[in-house]
Image (cartoon, rainbow, N blue to C red):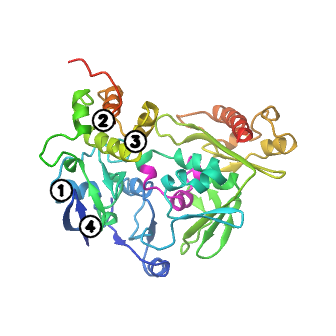
Amino acid sequence: MTEVKMTVNGKAVSGTVEGRTLLSQFLREDLEMTGTHIGCDTSQCGACVVHVDGQAVKSCAMFAAEADGAEVTTIEGMANADGSLSTLQQAFQDHHGLQCGFCTPGMVMSAAALLAENPKPSEAEIRHYLEGNICRCTGYHNIVKAIQAASGQDVAIAAE
Amino acid sequence: MYSFEYHNPASQKEAEELLASTDNPSLLAGGQTLLPALKHRLAEPSDLIDLKGIDGLSGIREENGAIVIGAATTHCEVSESELVAKRIPALAKLAGGIGDQQVRHRGTIGGSVANNDPAADYPAGCVGLGATIRTNRREMGADNFFVDLFETALGEDEMILAVSFPIPDQAAYIKFPNPASRYALVGVMLSKTGGDVRVAITGAGSSGVFRDSHIETALSKDFSVDAIDGSGVDEAEISADIHASAEYRKHLIGEMARRAVEAASGS
């Protein structure tokens, strides 16, 4: 067993984990933060994307022990301080960037990492960055629109 | 996943001691292939030795006409490196096309090279650019390093420290990705340095990465798209699976090589 300490959404946390405990498992089962979803558990789908030291990674493809000492941000850390949706999250709602919502935590985390690197991405850049995030409902169009809108680029609001 | 002991050594020496003193250790770099393999119980290491805490194992520098990339350097770091983009843009492009962005944030050159997946990009990058693999024991030319499917010349107590890529006059990497996995169905790394032409193929060899000497000879005489009349490799040596037949892969080798010549000539 290994002792791990990390910062999750600005809060210091610690735990005792097996070597084989995945970061996704640690977040969901030890910290009871179930916003990070496990879709495929084979690092294909991207539902489990979180930020580790500012970089978007698949938390099912990393051990909790590897995140020892790291700054981790999950979907639970994305809302504004007063609990209202962040600009990016609101854009997903406004543009119908989700249907069942299962992939959404990973989509939002990947999109946030993209916007941090590239504040005004083109449609092609957004689609390229989301290659590792799979959505089976929306066909991606509204997700792309939401990210463009969140970055301050003009897009039509989806019909009600 | 089977249980194992996780270690996070702070130095190469400490990692070497762990390699020597544990039963059935495995080295962990970015883990983007190792973790899925462990989940499928394809491997049962007693101990995982994480290399990411070792100083000096990651980073990119220019050294005597070569670009030297530390083993723990991520694909993202290579793809976004200004030095690589300036000296060997084909290598930056190769690294930027591996997996997806989240995987590129974790996956490393050392891990990819040591794993020697027959459809991975870096083996073609190493062989096609005539790289040297530096380990804690020796230096090996890429031509002798990649032995067979998922098999390299690395010994049990050996770890990759860096890969050194001589800077070519011209180079290009073109791959035809599997649309689902984005692994190379066929990938071609082509380089030209003086009169020396290298053409390395990934994704197609039934024993992993190989050089296509037929195309190399043709391009040595005439470095042009029209010089390539297809791959010289026997179809029996080319892999076939549900994704593509040997005949189709062979066709793709010629086509990707032509596109690589075009891209290299434009750079």
At 18% across and 40% down in the image, what residue appears?
A: A85
Q: Toward which corner of the image does residue B234 lie, by quadrant?
A: top right
Give the answer, above or below, for where B142 lies relative to B139. Answer: above
Q: Report the quarter where the N terminus of chain B lies.
A: bottom left
Q: Residues within 10 Å of mark 2 (few under 14, many from 20)?
A: many
Label 4 resides on the chain identified as A
Q: Which residue is mark 1?
A: A29
Q: Specify the label residue A150 is tagged with.
A: 2
Q: Nearer the viewer, mark 4 or mark 2?
A: 2
Q: Which residue is mark 4?
A: A18
Same subunit, labels 1 and 2: the answer reads: yes
Q: Residues within 10 Å of mark 1 (few under 14, many from 20)?
A: few
Residue B96 location, x and y as percent?
Answer: 53, 46
Label 3 resides on the chain identified as A
The verdict on residue B222 being magenta is no
For the record, the magenta segment spans B103-122
Q: Nearer the viewer, mark 4 or mark 3?
A: 3
Residue A49 location, x and y as percent?
Answer: 31, 48
The span from disc 4 to disc 2 (Cα, nearest Å) is 39 Å
Give amino acid for label 2.
Answer: Ala
Q: Toward which corner of the image does residue B147 lie, by quadrant?
A: bottom right
Residue most extreme to the left: A82
The span from disc 1 to disc 2 (Cα, nearest Å) is 32 Å
At 28% across and 57% down in the image, what residue appears?
A: A72
Give amino acid for label 1.
Answer: Glu
Badge 4 or badge 3: first in the primary sequence: 4
Give the answer, above or below, for where B152 lies relative to B128. Answer: below
Give amino acid for label 4.
Answer: Glu
Q: Specify the label residue A132 is tagged with.
A: 3
Residue most extreme to the right: B221
